[in-house]
Image (cartoon, grey):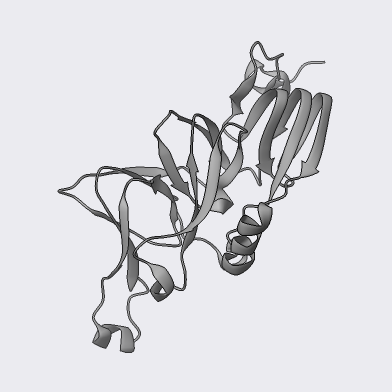
Amino acid sequence: MNSDLFAAENMATQATAPGMVQQNAKSLKYALDGECYARQGSMIAYRGDLHFEKKGQGVGKFLKRAVTGEGLALMAVRGRGEVWFAHEAANCFIVDLAAGDGLTINGRNVLCFDASLSYEIEIVKGAGMIGGGLFNSVFSGQGKLGVMCEGNPVVIPVSPQSPVFVDTDAVVGWSSALRTGLHRSQSLGSMLRGGSGEAVQLRLDGEGFVIVRPSELRPEKSAGN
């Protein structure tokens, strides 16, 4: 049988080492001999002796999810084999965290991650309830994190001399060492007259980077669905 469908870049090959690798722009493959965590419902295929279970969040994380709607519903994948993860054909990327690194990322952009990583759901410092309550997941430790983004992301360096302002509906994540706060780019009078639709942004200061998606979050996606 002949077809471009069977081109080498589309064919799955046997893993040569355990861990997370890029299958293609839209999916990640995880060669597992133990345990990893992934977004619930993100498995698209697997082979081997694998088991999938809803991951308990613990009382603290469960209450934070209930209050914040942070949308990081996880499953544990255990066993030995290979599993492929994807979500709605979003672009997928692997972030390799070293000891001392930290990444603050929106729960809706998490696809899968090594069990060696830890995460906490935290309020975005400086935003508080003024921004309606902004919450993200902070990953730390040593290991790989699979993230996803609708469209090609824009990664913007942040320096002490050049703070960056981002739309809260477009931001994917940022270096957790950055300082955050809300910035109002319109006068009160302009807002009362209808405004530009860009009244408040998230400000990031310090040394690091911020990742944004090429469009604002659609309302139906706000709960991480």
In the picture as drawn, the residue positioned furthest to the front comes out as: 59
Q: Quadrant of the C terminus?
A: bottom right
Tell whether 162 sits left or right of 53: left
Q: In the image, is residue 22 above or below residue 111?
A: above
Q: Position of residue 165 (x, y in %)?
A: 29, 58
Q: Is residue 223 visible?
A: no
**Position above or below: 60 against 9:** below
User: Is 182 in front, or is 151?
Assistant: 182
Residue 138 drawn at (x, y percent)? 48, 47
Residue at (46%, 64%) from the top-left corner?
134
Could you say which quadrant of the image residue 85 lies in? Answer: top right
| Quarter of the view holding residue 80 | top right
Q: Is residue 131 left or right of residue 14?
A: left
Position of residue 112 relative to residue 107, above or below, is above
User: Is residue 125 in sight in this rendering?
Assistant: yes
Percent x, y for residue 185? 26, 71
